[in-house]
Image (spheres, rainbow, N blue to C red):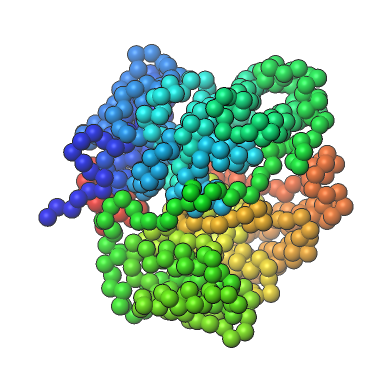
Amino acid sequence: MAEVVKGETNGEPMVSVLITVYNREKYVATAIESVLAQTYRNFELIITDDCSRDPSLQIAQRYQADRRVKVYRNERNLGDYANRNRAASLAKGKYLKYVDADDLIYPHCLETMVHAMEMFPQAGFGISSSVPGVLSPAMLSPRETYLYDYGGGGLLDAGPVSTIVRRADFEAIGRFNEARHTSDGLCWLTMARRHGVAIIAPGLYWWRLHDEQESIFEKRSAAAIAEVSGRRFRFAMEALWAEDCPLSIQERKAFAQKWHAYYGRSVINAMLHMKLDLARRLVKEAGLSFSAVLKAFCVQPAGSQASVPSFQPFSPSPSSRSPIVSGLSAKVSAFQHVSVSASPPVVSVLIPAYNAERTIGEAIKSVQDQRFGNWELLIVDDASTDRTAQIAASFASDPRVRLLRNEQRLGKWANHNRGAEAARGEFVKFLHADDLLYPHCLEHLLYFGQKYRQAGLIQSCEGVAPQYLAPKLQTPREAYQQEYFGAVTLWESPTGMVYRRDAWKSSGGLKADCPSAPARLHLEMARTAPVLLVYGGLAGYRRGSQQLRHRERGDFARSMADLDWLSQLLHHPECPLEDSEVAVATRNLQRLRRKWALSQWLGEEGRLARFAYRRLRPSLRYGAEYWGPYYRDAVFDPHLYPDAALSPQAGGEEVMR
């Protein structure tokens, strides 16, 4: 019997994927290929060309051999959001999924998004984003969404590529208002206060940066910057004082004061940098007066900072939480059919636990729900004083689950090492007892791990939007360049990593006396073997305010200790950096040492502290020299992904094995 393709029905498409194009000949084929490679198949792809002057239209038309692809050309140039509305007017699907012509979505994107939206029919749209305290898929009520966004969470700053929209609700508000650079934010504010938002796991798309983008803020004129900034401020205030705003009057007043202070600071900052024309335009576009701006700048909002909207740890209501469940289809990859009785297993999942009775059951269940089945699970209880061990023992009926108990408490990292010593799998995957794995986590990570056997460390970057198109194999030198000159990623929690067991053993494991032991281990492993970078969204994290910030006030001793071992690794005989790079990295560490020392005297706020920190900012040249060309030149290859449905251009219609 022929295999049922994911999401396929005989009726209208469930999802209308919309690609709006204007002069994107370098990238549009990659965007289209990423859509055609989706594991979820019940979609139509609508491409609207906005009178491109390059071959973008001709490139798109090559894909019309696929019956799901429809290509249209506008009679005249409409502009960005008017073209998005034009594409939406042609859609038939229950949901709309925008994919910009220079971006792409990973093969599991539509399946994950549709699954979340079907779970929460009351949500007007869904956002692929990481929200502290929320394990996706989840639902935020209108009030919860506004509290989080106006409190500084930035949830509704998302661009169209990170969202999926319920078409009926989108049509009900009149679609986008077509104002450039701000239409999506206004749309999300309007829909959120009427319907709420579904929170979907991150790591589903890749947003490409390149020199041709109109959204590059630094390239805009003063008039353009002021127009966009002022419009965003007005829209935020209008939404805050709308009749159907879900916040109380007191909350609205507090947030209005905070946002006025934030906007006032941007005006004063422009004046201090002698950008007087920009300051004047900012005031005019926001509909304010200079006296109102000065008053907002001088009056500090109660309990918050004036510089930026302060982030508050978010705790959603119990009704917004949902259990982790499997995907829409019963189909799984060939990986699951490996015999679970094979010895040894492919991967050892390790849960080091101490007094985790509240969350450990959910963590264990998330491992049992994996679509990949050839694993063993070791729970290492570090002499807990609560019911952690009893809860873990209740899962012992599964022959793949083992419980180890320490007679005396070893401590956090020593307990990690004990679990790794008992592991039998080729790969080691940690799962902290207050986190969990999404059903496709092991399937995807091990697919990449077996495909790129030269990598000792496989990392699913969860902290920030990745700069790379996954999978990305980094050489030791590239990994060190990134850590010492760019955006750090190897400080990721062990939950976001998979270790090849031989590489773990040769590195000596975690240093139990080092507070930042995982980061140190990752850098040591990266020195001798490539690092494989994979997309995020494979694990759920329960994060609070203390976990979000890498540096905490008063953590001076730990910061200095980190700088010591960072310097030691930098001057190790096998350090992969060149001598000139080591010299620059050494100066970076010295600047950080002075900066953190000054923070003990100046604090972390105030004009003097901000000025001093800017003067001591480390050199981040790696971002411009390395990631810039990679953003522009990366090409999507569906053959690299597990269970991807191949397009005719990629070699066939059947599902990849």
Tell me the quadrant of the picture where the N terminus can be found: bottom left
- Viewer-nearest residue: 268 or 351: 351
Q: Residue at x 74, y 41 (%)?
A: 304
**Image coords of residue 157 (percent x, y):** 56, 35
**Image coords of residue 6 (percent x, y):** 26, 48
Question: For residue 334, which quarter of the picture?
Answer: bottom left
**Image coords of residue 28 (percent x, y):** 38, 33
Q: Residue at x 51, y 51 (%)?
A: 318
Q: Is residue 559 above or below residue 353?
A: above
Q: Is residue 494 above or below residue 237?
A: below
Tell me the quadrant of the picture where the C terminus can be found: bottom left
Q: Residue at x 45, y 78 (%)?
A: 393
Q: Is residue 463 left or right of residue 427?
A: right
Q: Is residue 371 above or below residue 355?
A: above
User: In this orientation, does residue 325 appear?
Assistant: yes
Question: For residue 325, which quarter of the picture?
Answer: bottom left
